[in-house]
Image (cartoon, rainbow, N blue to C red):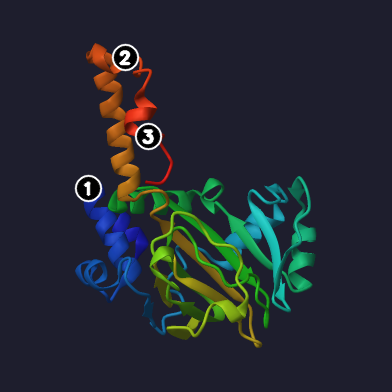
Amino acid sequence: TAREALEANGNSKVAAEKLFSLLIAPITMEEFYRDYFEKKPLLIKRKNGGYYDEFITMQHVQLLVDKGALEWSYEVDATSYAGGKRTTHNGEGDAEGEVVWDKYRSGCSIRLLRPQRRLDHMCTLLSVLEEHWGSSAGANVYLTPPGTQGFAPHWDDIEAFILQTEGMKHWKVYAPRNKEEEMPRFSSRNFEQSEIGEPILECDLEAGDLLYFPRGFIHQAHSSEKTHSLHVTISHGYRNQWYDYVKDVFNVALDLAMKKHVDFRHGLPHDITHNMGILGTEG
């Protein structure tokens, strides 16, 4: 269990590896990073509906919503997708619990953003996963009424781990459309169905199942006609690419060079554009 993973004799590295291993079991960490990470989706079917209950349950959602202290757009969204169009139905300021539930009953998908700010157990779980990934981890919770879809097809700028905890959702995942859209640094716009081609993975995610897909993989999901859907998306990799690392290292190196060597503090030659061109132009 997640609780057992967190009690790894006080060794944070071991606890982090155990928790991530629990997340993706029965796939091993070696298999995941060799065969799936940043490469292709991973679907794990478990037939164990309570497997992820330590992450999020309907009771947690009710606790957050009923307090009425969530802030629209920053902590909670109400969205719908119909006729090829995504619509956001948010109010302003604090989201009163009954207003949120009214929107849910009218067919809106409810997205709880950053639940770790208010749920201590979620904050703990994410902090342990951060130890494993060496970067920040995030979470959003999605509650979708039966027979609806809350979001248009799109890709995200993070590695996404979908942990289904209640109900069922039908997912479609699509490969990046071209090389330029692989490993994107920013999330995409909403796509039309005609723009995305055929899915490389189509599946029903039931309680206890996991779906992973890398950033840049377009996806969409529709809840079952018979039951609602509840899942939490655990994410990491946001602005944590080689570009970010090299940029930071170069900036530090340049700052040190400027402080230690007067040459870096001299002005540029008056004829530099005649000899070196203008930065940012082609050629």
Mark 1 residue type = Asn
On the rendered structure, is 97 left or right of 189? right
Residue 86 at x, y percent in the picture: 69, 68
Above-or-below relation of 205 to 274: below
- Circle nearer the viewer, 2 or 1: 2
> Which residue is at 54% across, 62% downward?
188
On the rendered structure, is 265 left or right of 13? right
Q: Which residue is mark 1?
A: 11
- Circle nearer the viewer, 2 or 3: 3
Give me the C-alpha separation between circle 2 and circle 1. Answer: 47 Å
- Report the disc number at residue 277: 3
Disc with the residue nearer the chain's start (2 vs 3): 2
Q: How would you rate the neighbour count of disc 3 (Cα within 10 Å): few for under 14, some for 14-19, many for 20 or more?
A: few
- Report the disc number at residue 265: 2
On the rendered structure, is 125 left or right of 34? right
Q: Do residues under tags 2 and 1 come within 8 Å of each other at their CB atoms?
A: no
Nearer-the-camera pick, 90 or 153: 153
> Which residue is at 58% across, 72% downward?
153
> Which residue is at 55% across, 80% downward?
169
* Number of disc labels: 3
Residue 269 at x, y percent in the picture: 34, 18
Nearer-the-camera pick, 251 or 25: 251
Q: How would you rate the neighbour count of disc 1 (Cα within 10 Å): few for under 14, some for 14-19, many for 20 or more?
A: few
Nearer-the-camera pick, 126 or 147: 147
Give me the C-alpha separation between circle 2 and circle 3. Answer: 21 Å
Give me the C-alpha separation between circle 1 and circle 3. Answer: 55 Å
